[in-house]
Image: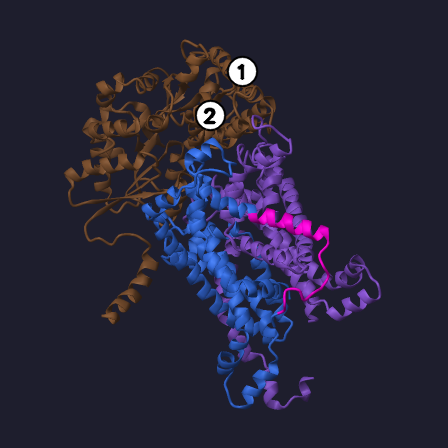
Amino acid sequence: MTAALPAGRRRWRGRHTVLAFVLPGLLYLLLLGLYPLVNLVQMSLSDVTARNIASSAWSLVGLHNFSRVLASPSFAATVPNTLIFVAIVFVLGMAGGLAGAVALESPGWLSQVVLGLMVFIWAMPPVVLGGIWKFILLPQGLANAVAGWFGVNHASDPILWLVWRPFALLSVAVVNGWAIIPFGTLVYRAALMDVPKEILEAAAIDGASPWQQFLRIKFPILRPVTLILAVLTLVYAFRSFDFIYVMTYGGPGVSTSTVPFYSYLESFAQFRFGLGAAVAVLTVLVVAVLSVVYVRATRGAEGG
Amino acid sequence: MRRPANAPTRRRRGPWVRLALLLMLLLYGVPLLWILITSLKSNVEIFANQASVIFKPTLHAYQQIAASGSLGTAMVNSLIIAGGTTLLTTFLGVLTAYGLARYRSQLIWWILGFLILLQMVPQTAEIIPLYHIFAVTGLVNTRLSVVLADSALLLPFAILILRPFFRNIPIEIEEAAAIDGASRLRTFLSVVTPLALNGIVTEAALVFIIAWGEFLYAISLLSNPGDYPVSAVLSQEIGAYNVSWPGLMALAAVGSLPILIVFLMAQRRLASGLSLGAVK
Amino acid sequence: MRTPSLRALCSALPAALLLGATSAASAKTLTVWEYFTGQGPQELKQLAQIFHKKYPDVGVNFVYIPYTQMTNKVVAAASIKTGPDVVLYNGPTIGSLVGAGALANLSSDWAAFSARNQFPKYVVHRVGGKIYGVQGYVNLLGLWYNKTILSKLGISAPPTDIAQLNADMAKAVAAGYQGITLSGKSNDQGEWQAYPWLSAYGWSYAKPTVASCQDAYALVRSWVNHRYLTAEASTWGQTAPFQTFLGGKVLFAENGNWQIGPAQKSAQFRYGVVPMPRGPHPAKLYLGGEVESVGAFAKHPHLAWDFLKTTLFSKAGELVALKVVGSIPSRADASRNKSVLSTPLIAPFAREVQTSGQLYPPEIPGFSSNAVERAQLAMGQQWSAVIAGLSTPASACKAAVSKVRSILGGH
């Protein structure tokens, strides 16, 4: 195809000038994005505590930090926490997102209001959202009042949403899922808008029910979007930090600590930077796998 | 470009859909309303009955935060940090995204993979190395360091959002300008950028919104709480158990006003454009 | 008119970005990092006034750092060779701070300080034989009680031992009140509040036994089971439980002398305080309170030391802390002051200092304060887990004691 173009155009599509556009941003990210990662790996292989964090002459200890982390019972507890947390956020985000988009397809002022509301919630700072939910979930809060109306509990015997096992982990995860549903809704909504109207009308004339229309026409169109959204939601759930920090700070004990949060606690509450870095490196390895999936999915969608 | 709201189907909504919409209205409306209601309560009312809906509203919490003056400082800090991050990220992001949109090579997948990897790294993993970089350069404890760190955090995201907008601009338009003798940079500035304006505004709004809410870098890189943005102040207050909930919610309400403004300005673009960028 | 102001703005903005909010005054200014809330800032203001009498030209800039961020910030600042002139912080973290090289060695200043004999041994903090910090006052725990509820229940006197305490709480809960509030947070604050109960059953870090731990933790667990104590306490620091107590529906609160101010300000009922109840053994109490140190990277180290000498290490300064916040002075000439021993709320605490005070953090010969800090944290985490119901007293104590032994040796 390129060969058919005039010489001037071919040069326009050439690589070198375009590369100049990429350079500043790429350099910035190499310095403030990649270098920190290299530094992190170095720290994970060294004995770093508050004592020697200042000097960069850390003594290498090989994989010692990793073996200590993997043998630690607190770390062991954060792994199932992470799996449960990610699963809840993921399922809520995807299913809620799709359900929201389908519901918002219907016309009317109510759809408009709900859509606006959801986008606004999604835009609110996570600390604010985590804060209001923490308040709602207090023993005398709104959540227990509502549960009281349904006869689930009594005021004298409130549910301790952010204390009891497994309520604490579930509560933080569900609130986190609630916060990400609007994103899924927006993505699915845009994808549904791209479904050609003519095909739907033709199907309706052929007597296909809305459910059949959804399964046969819309669902195939949503599939590539779903794959990419799935990766994004997974990653969002996995690196989630703000809600845990604000609502429970990982507690009681480590019952709401996920692996990335545990890494933060090791580094900044215990000052065992080497161990914290080792945990962080483990999490980066997990997301690295997910990023390969993402690139493949995007590549497939763009046909590159 | 603008579609009427009822474009996808002209079906009338069934009872299930109406129920779902009402449920969503409650789930997303009540917490928002609860922020406002709580901010209008007195501490005594909170103590007596947190879940009350009928009470004597008071502006006491708002008067207190107005009198303390710390909110003003925090808002200015937030504006400097979120504004600076938006400018820097958008400047670098637009250049890079354009370059990546027009660059054809296998290398591009490696670069995209790198961006996505960065996008996925937990923020907690980057704090210590960043702190060291800023310590060496003497920038630590400055709001500038938070701007630089937030930009590093958000630049991959910005590039991924922006790239599809540039890809959607037919290259023939540029080539026509090139035949007229315009240089690449001039073509980019005068032809390409205006066409991608929709995407750039979307990206800038998203970056501003996320930077406004970011607090981990702020509490980690700033020593002086006088430099804290609103989000960092809130994170410390909510974590501190001796909270005055009305005061906190008043702070949250006022501190989120700029988000409301950005939201109102960019709502339509967010609702239709975000997904396009985020996905493709 | 417009141009100069615009120019000023343009040059000021980058400067503001670079410098943060540090004041660029030409006169000398001392920077003091602290985490004081409530009446604390008022105390600091009055201390600064004492200092200004001697040094009218030196400013004092108090920088509030949130409690949970303090160690972080000091360590981080030291790692780039900066830091405050003076830092007021929580005692157990001294090991981390000295380890990070953040604190100045005060040994020779202390040796030359004429009033040093006024200070009891337990407020002078040594790491590796060198003095790095001193406490101008101590804080400790007592058992607060709601006198109004007590008399409604027909109880004539507040409890002195755990059996009486249990009986009183049972009456309170039967009458629709709550029994007690305390901190069960999974950190140093939780351990600080667990220690009086632990020691009442014979616990000591030098000789940790599963049995003494289990007695104490089973006690607190039984309170949660009997609804004397809410499991929510597992997330409380030391402020939330006292606020709950001030709500007037709880009979007891395990809390400190620094709550005298808040109690006087907002309690709508009669209240009092007694020493912590004893078990098979008398309860022992950590003598906490902020440790005062000079930063290793202080801009004005001599002024900083003089600031401490004239304020929190002076009789006048310690009396300010007593009057404003209720802190118990550590200098002998200040704690023997009439106002200390005659104030009903202060007297029980002052008595406790003499009878059952313990060095905080506890000193275990041969082990660094850093190791002791980690052992304490292990106890605090399990304390929290038991209150939250995440762990049984038996398994919690087994885990905690094996951790403590692995850190501090078998004994």
Q: Please state which of residues C116 and C161 is positioned toward the viewer in this rendering.
A: C161
Q: Please state which of residues A187 and C72 is positioned toward the viewer in this rendering.
A: A187
Magenta part of the protein: which range? B3-29
Q: Which residue is mark 2?
A: C182
Q: Position of residue B165 (x, y in %)?
A: 58, 71
Chain C hue? brown
SS at mark 1? helix
Circle 1 packing at 10 Å, graded few (<14), some (14-19), many (20+), is few
Kindly tell me whether residue B202 is visible in this rendering: yes
User: What's the residue type where badge 1 is placed?
Assistant: Ala
Q: Is residue A35 above or below residue C74?
A: below
Kindly tell me whether residue B218 is visible in this rendering: no
Disc nearer the start of the sequence (1/2)? 1
Q: Position of residue C29 (x, y in %)?
A: 23, 47
- Chain letter, disc 1 residue: C
SS at mark 2? loop
Q: What residue do we see at 47% from left, 42% from top?
A: B38
Q: Please state which of residues C168 and A15 is positioned toward the viewer in this rendering.
A: C168
Chain B hue? blue
Q: What residue do we see at 42% from left, 56% from top?
A: B146
Q: Position of residue A110 (x, y in %)?
A: 62, 55
Q: Which residue is mark 1?
A: C174
Chain letter, purple: A
Q: Is residue A132 above or below residue A232?
A: above
Residue C58 falls inside the magenta stretch: no
Question: Looking at the picture, do discs 1 and 2 lie on one chain?
Answer: yes
